[in-house]
Image (cartoon, rainbow, N blue to C red):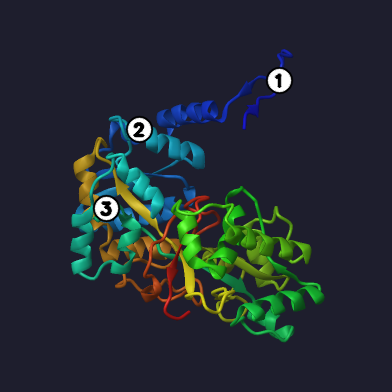
Amino acid sequence: MPATLPATTSGTAPRTVTRRALLTAAAAGTLATACGTAEGQPPGKVAVFGDSAALAEPMTAAGAALRRVAGISLVPEVNPSLEAFEQVVKTSLRTRKTPDLLKYWSGYRLKELARTGGIEDLTGAWDAAARRGWVDRSLRAAFSHEGRVYGLPMNLAYWVFFYNPELFADHGLRRPRTWGDFLAACARLKRNRITPLHGTAHERWPSFIWFQEVLSRQDPRFYEELMTGRARYTDPRAERALRTVVSFFDQDWFTPMDMDFPDAAAAVVHGRLGMVPCGTWLGSTLAGAGGRPGVNVDAFVLPMAEPGARPSVIFESSALVATVKGPDRAEALKATRGWLHPAVMKAFAHTLQDNCPNPRVPRPTRSSPDSPPRSAATGCGCSTGSGSRARPNSSRPPSTTSRASC
């Protein structure tokens, strides 16, 4: 859809420009300002280009640990515009001005990037880490294309529903074990003048959340097919999920659509909101709002709507990617070989306050309660969260994975 620029002070009429033109202009500016890797970093340093300032602190902490392990420090570089970030990555891969390392999405987005031939095959780094037990082997498919690994996992976030156990107890409710329990809890909270559910389109990217949660509980196999382009959004199963979400609107179960996650987290902690669906990366935001795990904040995986469907949970994991034409290519590859080291992963995960793809790293003390076990991740994941107040990944819906017990 064309975008209209406002009139200038001289009274010139508005002019219409295409979305492509806007993105191209944004990308050009970004290459000049945010992509310092075009000139390379000083010896012993490698830049990591991402789309969220929320990863700067975790990446810096990981870089300090990586320097001790491999003699390489990481320098975070950020373009907070999702569209401009993608444009920079995809156009610069063909040039010598591409970043050395990227924070990218796993799953089908990573496969698309691998097909360009512009990113490194990291199978050797993955296999070496796997032999040491430094990576959950079940995640490999999410980072692979045609049997080769093109990204290394950075975090491991599960999508859960956060709630306040004290609020639930006050209204005679327990954590939902079935889809019927979940609907009954929403209805009771609404009768008692508590808004049951957080729903938001703030900053646009959360718009997929409710469609994701409902469809993956009604038909997880179809959800996977839809996310990988093997099914259509006009399919009756997609329409059914949308009708379910509409029914929640009709019953006035949602918050205003402009309520952001920090406000929603505070509302849950203080008993003004029933449930918030989100990645486990919301844990630090809840803690910052006064949340105490097991006391005034806890979490559950949304039960399956169809009893016959295989139990599933959404997970997401960002990918650390090395480019072929980056100016510091040798040091970037050296950094990837040390990325999954327990000391590096611990520094990153504990600063981010989320789960870690390295099974040797314990969960951070203040991590989100009741996260599904790592052994649950047996399928492919996709895009993301923040250890602070913003989501480090993006608007791309994650994929489902089977879970053992949650």
Query: Which comes before the other along the chain, label 2 or label 1?
Result: 1
Residue positioned 63% across, 74% down in the render: 163
Comparing 140 with 77, the one in front is: 140
Helix, strand or loop under label 2: helix
Residue that mark 2 sits on: 92
Residue positioned 50% across, 26% down in the render: 25
Task: Tell me residue 308's x, y (percent).
Answer: 52, 78
Residue that mark 3 sits on: 146
Query: Which comes before the other along the chain, label 3 or label 2?
Result: 2
Task: Tell me residue 4's x, y (percent).
Answer: 66, 26
Q: Give the residue type at disc 2.
A: Ser
Of labels 3 and 2, the one closer to you: 3
Residue that mark 1 sits on: 7
The picture quadrant where one finds residue 157 is bottom left
Q: CA distance from mark 3 to mark 1?
A: 51 Å
Helix, strand or loop under label 1: loop
Horizontal arrangement in the rendering, residue 149 relative to residue 260 (left or right): left
The picture quadrant where one finds residue 33 is top left
Q: CA distance from mark 2 to mark 1?
A: 33 Å
